[in-house]
Structures are given as C-alpha cells and as structure tokens.
C-alpha cells in the first residue's frame, strides 16, 4: 500500500460517498507536525498527495513540504494541479483561438483534433468588453450594452463556438458581472468534487487578480493564457515551493477608515518588502475581525504588492459568507467538516504556523488614503493629497513652459479649469465593488451630499460599473442608487471599465481642450491599477480611492484640494461643506447591510448566471470540431504560433548577432508592452485596420482584438507613455540599426525580419509588472524577440516569456544597460544555451560595439524549474503540450 492509499478516507454528502486524502493522517504516518505549516502550504500538500503518482509527484516532494521553511530557500520545484481554470474575455478569446489552432495543428500532423479538449473545468466570464460610451443618464447601461454587442458580435459568437465545441467549458455572458466577484459570490464553493473525490477548490486564472478568491480560503493565482491553456489540457503547473510571509493584523480599523485604505497601506508595505513570487498569509485577531469582503479586497491586490497569493484561512466568517451567498446548509456543513478533518479550518487553539518572515500591521494605524499618480503602491495619506499633487504639478511644470488655466463652457455654463481637474471619477472594479461596506458608504455619502444641495462638477465624467448585479440590487432596495444617479453615477455596465482603459470618450469639451492645451487632467477611481496611459490617454495623473472618496472627489472636481481640511463644496444655504459633514458612520452603513444584504438577493441574481440576455441568446454558432476561420476577419484570425511545429523542434541554442529593439527602464508594465485600450488611428495597428476597411469608430480596443495576432503584434510596445532610451520621444518608437533610422518598433522589427535578425530587449527592475496578459509575451515573440535581459521580473510575465519560447535573462552584479554603457547600437550574442542548460544557470552575453570592441558580462537564465527547460526547448509550453498529446495518442 503506497502513501496515498494509506491516507485515503471517506465522507458522505448528498447520498454519496466521496474519498479524500487526509493530510492530518499523512503527517501522523510520517511523524511530522502539520500545525507548523501555513494554511496555504497545507493546501499545496493536499494537492501533492491527491495527485501522487510516484512519477511526476514523488514521496520526496511530500517530505519536502514538511521541511517547507528550509526547502523554500532551495529553489525546490513541485507540480500543482488546479481543480479548475478561470478566464475573462480579453485573455479568454486568445486562449480559445489557440485551442482552435492547436486542433488544426494536430489535424495537419495526422492526429485526432479531439485530443485538444479541457480536462479541467473552465469558466469564461465576459466582463472586459463594455465601454463607457454613454454615462450620466438612465439609458446609459442599455445603450452601452447595445454598442458592446455591435462591436463584439463576432468575438461573442466565437466564444459560443468554444462553449459548444469544447468539453467542460462554460461561458458567463456579458452583463452578469466581473470575473472575480462572480467567482467569489457564485462559482467557488471553497471545496470541489470530481470522480467521487472531494478536495479543496483551487484554480489558476488568466487575470492577475484571480487572487481575490484567496479571501475565501481558496488557493488560486493569475497566470498567462498560455499557461492556463496547458493547465486546461492536463499539464500541471510547475512552481517553486514558495516562501510564505506571515502578515499579522492586529487591532481594528478606526471609524472613517475603509478596507480600501487598508489594502493601499498593505500594498505600500509589502511592495517595499519585496514579496514577488512569495505567498502572503494573513493572520491575527485583526484579520478575523474583518468581514470576508475586506479579506477579498486584500487578496485582490496581491499582484499590486507583488505576491503570488494573499491568503486568508477558512474560518467561521468564511462559512457565514458561503451561507449568505446562497450555498446550501448541507454544503456549508460539509465544508466545515472537511476542512476541519484536514486541518484547513483555522484553529485558534493552536500556535501560529511558522512563516519565512513576519510583517505586523496594526489596523488602528491605518488612515484614509489614496494612491497615485502612476503606481498603486504609491500610497498617499488623504491629508497629504494636496501637497502630493503639488509635487506632481511641479514635475509637470518642468516639462511645460507655463502652467495653464483654461476657460471652458459646458451646457452654457462657463468654468475656469485648473491643473488637477478631475476628468473621470468612476466607481468600478471588483476590488471595491465586492465590498458592501464601501458601496453603501458611497451611497450614503451621495445621499447626504444631495440633501445639502451639492452637485458633481460639470467637467467630471462619472460612472458606476459594479462587479455584480447584487450590488445594484441592494443599492436600489436601500434607496441609495437614486442619490448616486443624481450625482451622475448612473449604471454604465457590469464589467471592467476605466480601470482597464474602457473609459470611453471624455466629456467633449474636456476632450477638445485636452488635445489643444497642456492642462494636467486627473482621474480618480475605485480600481486597483493606475499605470501611465491606462485609464485614458489624455489623463496624466490617476488616483485610486475608496468608492465614497470617489464620490467626494467628483463633487470637489479637483485633486488640488485637501479633503481633510478644505470644503468640497457649498450647501444650498451657502455654507461650506466638508468631507466630515457627509461621511456616514459605521452604524449607518451596518444598519443598511443587515437589512438589505441577504441570501434571497444572491440566489435571485445568480439564478440565470449562464443564460444571458436576448442579445446573447440570439447569437448562433456551429459546434464543429474544427473552427471555420474567416480570412477577412479582423477580430479572429488563425495564429501562426504552430506553423513550424515538429517533433524535431529544439530551441536550446545560442542566440547570435541579435539587435537591440528597445532599452527600457524600471517598472515597465504589461500595459507598456501590450496596451489594452484604444487603438490610435495613426498607429501601425490603426493603419492595418484602416487598410482592412474598418472605420475608426469601429476600431474598438486592443483588448477586444486579442484574437487577431496581426493587430496585437502591431500594438506591441505601442503604449504612448513608453520610454525607449534609443529615442528621445515617448511612444512605440526605436532606432533601426545599422541604418540609424527612427521608425516605429513594429516597422523596425519588420526590417530586421527581412534579414532574419534576432532581437533582444534590455530592461530594468520589475519588468512585466501589472496584468497577466500573455500578449506581452506573444507580441514580442511575433516581432522576433528571442530574449529579454532585465534586472528583475514580475512572476507571471517571466513565466509567460518561457511559455512562448522567449528567453528571460537577468543582469548580475548590479549591472544594467547604463552601467555597461550599452546604447542600442551593439549586436548581442548569448552563449551557453545548449542541451546541457540547467535552471538558473549563468551564461555569457557578448555585446559588440560599432567599432568592433566587445563587452562581456554574465547573466542568469531565469528558467526556474526543470520542466520549464523542456517548455523552452520545444519553443514554448503549448508546443510541448501538443507534442506530448500526440505522443500519447500514438
């Protein structure tokens, strides 16, 4: 009897017997102490014993977990099999495109296309396509939905093909909610069932904020689409046993302080702690006093502080939330029994687990905060907001000859607009709209403001885009939707809006002024990211804030204001109104939540979660095994990734005489590499669409066109705020060598391709931070980039590069392009890449200058696990999976 069989036990549920693998018993048999393991690591242990086969997963891997604190320092790799995969439409469409193309590749190699089918359950939530075209009136939502379907009909039909043709593949139609809030409120039960087994729910998702589910005690994180596709097809996730940083929360939040303020504080602290690639596990009396929605907010912003997960263990609050959101009493009882039996239910009678390191945060020290203007980790105390903006203004002044004030007329009224004017104020993103406390607070603040006669400023484009229909349900029943609408926060959609660049046009008068004058416009939103050019191209400073603060700033109309001491407006009696005058008390908020938030609301709103509206139900699509590609389509095109796939593929070879496509600085995000927002008319992607007879009004966004590699490769490095050291201006420009001609990055890549010249990117620290988008790896691959040399990488992007067969290399000894005096004119050769390559091996780079002199320096190969070497050798993880499936079939 092997170790797995020794710990097999049974639980009864719904008239059936389910087997499970008891990790408490496992610890006892091995003479180990389970209680010292962090709860997140216990989940990894359960995953290992359940999938133990003595081939991929060996007894040594299980023993290594029990020696976790030491093993985490030794780059020990394990395999993890998530119980399901979660997609959103911007990243989900290219996943389905790849699966369709893989079926074609298998068919062309004489295999059965049916072997390309998800083995793990997959849910695709359509939430990234709605844009704020209309706003501020009662028909805004209805009209935005019509435009959404008009623009995306072809994409939506394609997703329907996926639903009909792929096994274990479900689609949550548009208008239902945001992926992570739907996952939290409906899709996850905290445990899962299959093949008469019961086990902890776990997942990977093609959105970096998949971590939100960690607040429910579920292990899950974001991956690129290519890694998610491999997981769907049965390939385990290769990962290093992580360090776990314990974050001890003590005390309670003071009145007037929100979960948003807490997560911005945590993001600041943990980003400074440098937790990239590590697990965060929250514990302490402060955590267990937080409602589950606040824990989900903490988990949601794990990518912003850099961690793989931000985990809170299951406790009574978790069980109560499962009941609230409509799970049956029998299921909740089973969750309690199973997690208790497994040692996965928090037990306050035990000592705290052992952690790699500790961070302690007293909740009483948290203060009202915002973050900006370019990064979510740059927290600003609300009381310091005005001074911080003045600093931004001073930097802005250095690049402008004079700071301007502009007169503007809107609806017949003339206004004097100053730098700092807020052009967008949006209550959006599941980060905060999943939290009833801050949403009810926003509604109460709006009501108090209306009662005093306050209005939002005419130049502010306002919008409400919550993460589920539950939110508008309780706002409506509590009569708080009406005051929000009176301040312009009308419902515009259920999806990601300004937080991913789907802001739509600014108020026309503001848009005209922004294109003509150097005025520093700002935005404020309740999202999780505020990177350069992400929210809107015309807005240069973007701030994150809680929903009630978003409402307050919309009334104030400017970031050049101290909301803690200065009035945000004048009442109908002519008196100054301060933020404290309209800020709701905790008692007021709780009274509404207790009355309006109930099981029946969740059950009603999610009863038709997979049905969709008439627009969705009217879409017709075949269920053919092979997709019928339309060569005239500008949305869905057969990609070229598998064109040269063969059993003889071997990517393990030196990269010789490559050229430098770009030299980039620190904190280059995946938004810089692969924009998601609007497509400019004069850009290479815009020219392509124009050549294909697409009107500018129908360009849609880069995110919506990720099913077309022709658009996406032209948009790669096309962010208007990209700073490439090879050129003096911002945007997607470079110098082509040896011609020394300035041209777009795409055009330069095309020129290099004519001569079969490989390309490299040089970059600074935190390369590839931000969203999980795999097109930030696919795009460079299609441009001919063979390697990236950076000072450090964000976790998901490094994995994506390996997954596309692009070599991630890391500077050593404090080197970078500047210290090595590389100016971009050099040719680059990377030596030591052969069949003997090891994980995290040092190899040599030789840069040859124009005068023939050479600079030689060592770099670290950031292929972190043995299986990743096989992926890279095959030209990427999808190539590897296809070839493995073909071998098994034969």
Image (cartoon, helix red, strand yellow):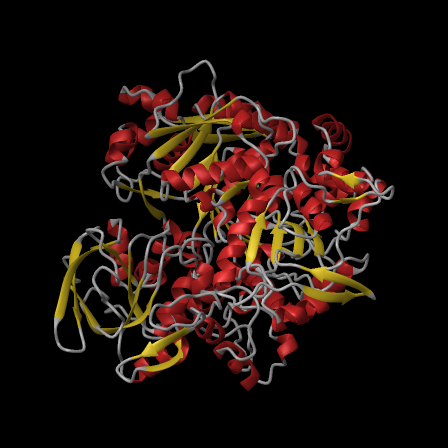
Where is residue 816? Give x, y as percent. 25, 58
Q: Residue 278: which quarter of the image?
A: top left
Residue 525 versus residue 862: which sits nearer the camera?
A: 525
Instruction: State the residue at coordinates (71%, 57%).
Output: 460
Quadrant the N terminus occupies: top left
Where is residue 507? Give x, y as percent. 71, 65
Where is residue 783? Give x, y as percent. 36, 73
Extreme-front residue of the structure? 402
Left/right of residue 877 with respect to residue 825 in the rendered view: right
- Confirm whether residue 235 shows in the render: yes
Left/right of residue 868 with respect to residue 743 in the rendered view: left
Extreme-top residue of the structure? 349
In the image, residue 864 above or below residue 443: below
Residue 611 versus residue 214: which sits nearer the camera?
A: 214
Quadrant the C terminus occupies: bottom left
Left/right of residue 632 with respect to residue 101 in the rendered view: right
Query: How many numbered marks are there?
Result: 0
Left/right of residue 848 with respect to residue 163 in the rendered view: left
- Confirm whether residue 213 shows in the render: no
Residue 795 versus residue 579: which sits nearer the camera?
A: 579
Where is residue 845? Give x, y as percent. 17, 63
Instruction: State the residue at coordinates (63%, 81%).
Output: 695
Q: Residue 492: which quarter of the image?
A: bottom right
In the image, residue 860 above or below residue 588: below
């Amino acid at each position: 009897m092997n170790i797995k069989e020794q710990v097999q036990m049974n639980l009864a549920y719904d008239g059936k017997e389910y087997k499970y693998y008891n990790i408490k018993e496992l610890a006892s048999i091995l003479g180990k102490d389970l209680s010292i393991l962090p709860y997140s690591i216990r989940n990894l242990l359960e995953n290992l014993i359940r999938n133990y086969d003595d081939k991929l997963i060996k007894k040594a891997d299980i023993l290594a977990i029990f020696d976790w604190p030491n093993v985490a320092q030794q780059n020990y790799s394990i395999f993890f099999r998530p119980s399901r995969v979660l997609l959103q439409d911007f990243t989900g469409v290219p996943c389905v495109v790849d699966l369709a193309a893989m079926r074609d590749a298998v068919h062309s190699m004489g295999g059965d296309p049916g072997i390309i089918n998800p083995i793990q359950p997959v849910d695709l939530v359509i939430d990234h396509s709605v844009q704020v075209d209309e706003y501020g009136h009662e028909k805004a939502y209805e009209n935005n939905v019509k435009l959404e379907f008009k623009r995306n009909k072809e994409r939506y039909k394609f997703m329907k093909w996926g639903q009909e043709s792929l096994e274990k593949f479900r689609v949550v139609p548009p208008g239902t909610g945001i992926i992570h809030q739907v996952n939290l409120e409906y899709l996850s039960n905290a445990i899962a069932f299959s093949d008469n087994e019961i086990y902890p729910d776990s997942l990977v998702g093609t959105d970096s904020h998949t971590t939100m589910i960690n607040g429910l005690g579920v292990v899950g994180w974001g991956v690129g689409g290519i890694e998610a596709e491999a997981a769907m097809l049965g390939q385990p996730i290769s990962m290093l046993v992580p360090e776990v940083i314990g974050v001890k929360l003590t005390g309670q939040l003071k009145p007037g302080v929100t979960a948003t303020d807490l997560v911005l504080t945590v993001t600041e602290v943990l980003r400074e702690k440098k937790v990239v690639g590590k697990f965060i596990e929250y514990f302490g009396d402060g955590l267990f006093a937080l409602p589950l929605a606040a824990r989900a907010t903490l988990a949601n912003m794990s990518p912003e502080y850099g961690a793989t997960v931000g985990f809170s263990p299951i406790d009574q609050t978790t069980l109560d939330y499962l009941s609230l959101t409509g799970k049956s009493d029998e299921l909740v009882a089973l969750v309690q029994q199973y997690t208790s039996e497994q040692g996965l239910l928090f037990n306050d009678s035990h000592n705290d687990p052992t952690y790699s390191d500790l961070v302690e945060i007293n909740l009483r020290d948290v203060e009202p905060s915002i973050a900006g203007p370019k990064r979510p980790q740059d927290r600003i105390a609300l009381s310091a907001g005005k001074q911080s903006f003045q600093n931004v203004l001073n930097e802005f002044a250095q690049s402008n000859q004079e700071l301007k004030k502009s007169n503007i007329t809107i609806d017949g009224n003339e206004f004097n607009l100053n730098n700092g004017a807020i052009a967008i104020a949006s209550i959006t993103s599941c980060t905060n709209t999943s939290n009833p406390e801050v949403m009810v607070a926003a509604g109460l603040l709006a009501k108090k403001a209306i009662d005093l006669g306050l209005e939002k400023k005419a130049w502010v484009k306002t919008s409400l885009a919550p993460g589920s229909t539950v939110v508008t349900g309780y706002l409506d029943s509590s009569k708080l939707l009406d005051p929000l609408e009176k301040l312009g926060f009308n419902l515009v959609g259920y999806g990601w809006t300004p937080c991913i660049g789907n802001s739509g046009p600014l108020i026309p008068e503001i848009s005209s002024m922004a294109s003509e004058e150097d005025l520093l416009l700002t935005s404020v939103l309740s999202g999780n990211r505020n990177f350069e050019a992400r929210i809107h191209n015309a807005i240069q400073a973007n701030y994150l804030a809680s929903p009630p603060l978003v409402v307050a700033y919309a009334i104030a109309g400017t970031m050049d204001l101290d909301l803690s001491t200065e009035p945000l407006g004048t009442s109908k009696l002519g008196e100054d109104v301060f933020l404290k005058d309209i800020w709701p008390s905790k008692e007021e908020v709780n009274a509404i939540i207790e009355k309006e938030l109930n099981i029946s609301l969740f059950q009603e709103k999610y009863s038709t979660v997979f049905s969709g509206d008439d627009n969705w139900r009217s879409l017709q699509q075949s269920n053919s095994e092979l997709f019928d590609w339309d060569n005239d389509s500008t949305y869905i095109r057969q990609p070229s990734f598998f064109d040269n796939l063969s059993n003889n593929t071997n990517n393990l070879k030196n990269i010789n005489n490559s050229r430098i496509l770009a030299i980039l600085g620190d904190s280059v995000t995946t938004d810089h590499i692969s924009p998601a927002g609007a497509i400019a008319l004069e850009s290479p992607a815009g020219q392509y669409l124009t050549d294909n007879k697409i009107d500018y009004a129908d360009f849609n966004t880069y995110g919506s066109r990720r099913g077309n590699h022709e658009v996406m490769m032209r948009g790669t490095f096309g962010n208007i705020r990209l700073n490439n050291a090879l050129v003096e201006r911002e945007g997607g420009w470079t110098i082509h060598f040896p011609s020394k001609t300035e041209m777009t990055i795409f055009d330069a890549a095309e020129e290099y391709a004519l001569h079969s010249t490989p390309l490299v990117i040089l970059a600074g620290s935190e390369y590839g931070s931000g969203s999980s988008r795999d097109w930030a790896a696919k795009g460079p691959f299609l441009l001919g980039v063979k390697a990236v040399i950076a000072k450090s990488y964000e976790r998901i992007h490094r994995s994506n590069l390996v997954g596309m067969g692009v070599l991630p290399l890391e500077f050593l000894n404090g080197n970078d392009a500047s210290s090595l005096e590389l100016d971009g004119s050099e040719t680059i050769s990377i030596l030591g890449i052969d069949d003997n390559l090891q994980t995290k091996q040092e190899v040599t780079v030789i840069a040859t200058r124009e005068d023939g002199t050479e600079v030689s320096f060592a770099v670290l190969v950031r292929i972190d696990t043995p299986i990743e070497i096989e992926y890279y050798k095959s030209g990427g993880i999808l190539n590897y999976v296809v070839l493995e499936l073909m071998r098994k079939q034969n």
